Amino acid sequence: MATAIAGVAAADGDVEGVTSRTASLRKLARDPAAVIGAVIVVIVVVCAVFAPLIAHADPNAQDLTSTLLPPAWIAGGVHAHPLGTDNLGRDVLTRIIWGARVSAIVGISVVLIGGTIGVTAGLLAGYRRGWVDAVIARITDVQLAFPLVLLAVAIVAVVGPGLWTVIAAIGLTSWVQYVRVVRAETLSLREREFVLAAQAAGATTPRVIGRHLLPNVASAAIVLGTFEIARAIVLESSLSFLGLGVPPTTPSWGGMLADGRQYLDTAWWTALFPGLAIMIAVMGVNLLGDGLRDALDPASR
Amino acid sequence: MTAYLGRRAFGALWAVIGVAIVVFVILHITGDPAAVMMPPESTQAEIDAFRHAQGFDRPLIVQFASFAASAAHGDMGSSLRHQEPAMGLAIQRLPATIELAGCAFLIVALVGVPAGVLSALRPRTWIDYTARVIALIGQSAPTYWIGLMLILLFAVRLGWFPASGIGDWRNLALPAATLGFFSTAKIMRLTRSAMLEVLDADFMRTARAKGLTAVRVSLGHGLRNAWLPIVTQLGVELGTLLSGAIITETVFAWPGVGRLAVQAVFERDFPVVESVVLLTATIFVVLNLVVDLLYAVLDPRIRYA
């Protein structure tokens, strides 16, 4: 009997979830800004995954006979280097395509780390209340007081630069937003009938959280996650720009800008195009996030 | 009200203590702060001597107790590269950062709010679209790249403003615009949506029906009621600007707290890094506390029990 009630409650939730999710996707597809965002995101991911197939050249191949060549459409530019070359004669376009890899890996990893920690903490804080909530709230207060860039810089400075240090440093600064949103949602959900029914049916805390609460906070977490991807991409490029990110041999947009900065007065293209790549990628993620928010979670506008 | 004040002040104090604890933990994360702080080319004997001199060979709990006791007095030890107290170095740089952040804040408030209001009052016009595109760019482009592009255009090409350094207002223009860009975009979007929400309210229709001028209706009745989230966010942005100027200061060689922190990181001067983190976190926490209290003044409906 008890399991039957729990089953009905869960099934109800699922059916509701599926129909509303299909409707949300349809709504998303009708939102031109969101579609543009999605297309940009797909392009960046394709560049990241298939970089060796799209750009055959070695992104680190130096050609000291053709350094700081301008883009192809400007006098002095050549077709072999459509967006010009940098101070070591490396092809700017090739490095931008390969640079998508670092941004994509960082964006996705940071969301997985921050999202897992933040959603778990938010669910626990909102559902258990009491001392669990108090402890998590105190930790959140500390995290919110920290200047985020400075925290990431300090962690990388102590541990040493590298892709995974950067991911860990940014991931450990990104969980806090999820806690606030998920906790607030959970606080109202825990009083709803389907949760009370599950509790009455004897469902354990992990089961209530995993089967009944998690699916219902997922929309809000996904929307937040997209914006966190955007933030992670910008923060990673900032760290690389400061020389605290990925090693110089790994092509990254922030690293390219750090190099290009020194040639602003003679070779503007080395600083313009990598920055455009970051801006367009982040804009794509932001547009998609705006669309997802409108489609999944209209109340939070 | 007093109870609320006490609770909030206690929370703020805890946040600063928590930041100090995290700073201590980060420095000990690799297990050997002496190796982290010494130049990479140091010999083992030099590192051992340094470890002993700094007291890193004591039990962790003893180290933490002495760290906490000094930190409570604002004493973060001496800079390893300059023979001066580390916190003193950070505080010396504070006026430059406040000047930059204050200027950026003026841009945020004086451009972001009016642009957001206009955008909401004239939806689907070129004003609205321009403001929204600029807001989208501001929220997507990294701060340092905006800085580089402003240097490229206004310093290298047009030669209107110097590319770096400190001096008169012309040195301030580009870094302030760079630092304020992201926050301006955010405030613009927030103001727009807050205004749009209020514009449909019944009291707005009443105000128009009373025959008030369009300006009085939109500002006196509209903005006055949309004000609260905007002011809150402005307060948060001021804190962010003060604590987030690291990258802008580095790009423009602006001699503020953030640049000091980056230099200190590269010189492995950790007492200075710790001081900057603690100082900026304290400023941020205090500002947020002030914003929360401003709430009560701005919105008489809020009564703290």
Image (spheres, coloured by chain):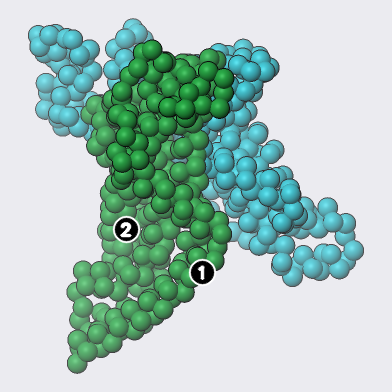
Which chain can be seen in green? Answer: A
- Which residue shows up at 68% across the image and 60% down it? B196
Residue that carries the numbered disc 1 in the rendered image? A27
Residue B232 visible in the snapshot: yes
Label 2 to label 1: alpha-carbon separation = 26 Å
Q: Give coordinates of residue B302: x percent, y percent.
A: 59, 59
On-image quarter of the C terminus of chain A: bottom right
- Which residue shows up at 50% across the image and 35% down it? A276
Horizontally, residue B291 falls left or right of residue B281, namely right
Horizontally, residue B13 falls left or right of residue B4, namely left
Residue that carries the numbered disc 2 in the rendered image? A119
Which of the 4 quarters of the picture holds residue A20?
A: bottom left
Assign a secondary structure to mark 2. helix
Marks 2 and 1 belong to one chain: yes
Report the mark closest to the observer, 2 or 1.
1
Assign a secondary structure to mark 1. helix
Quick one: which residue is furthest to the right in this view?
Answer: B211
Which chain can be seen in cyan? Answer: B
Q: Give coordinates of residue A17: x percent, y percent.
A: 38, 76
**Frontmost residue, B204 versus A214:** A214
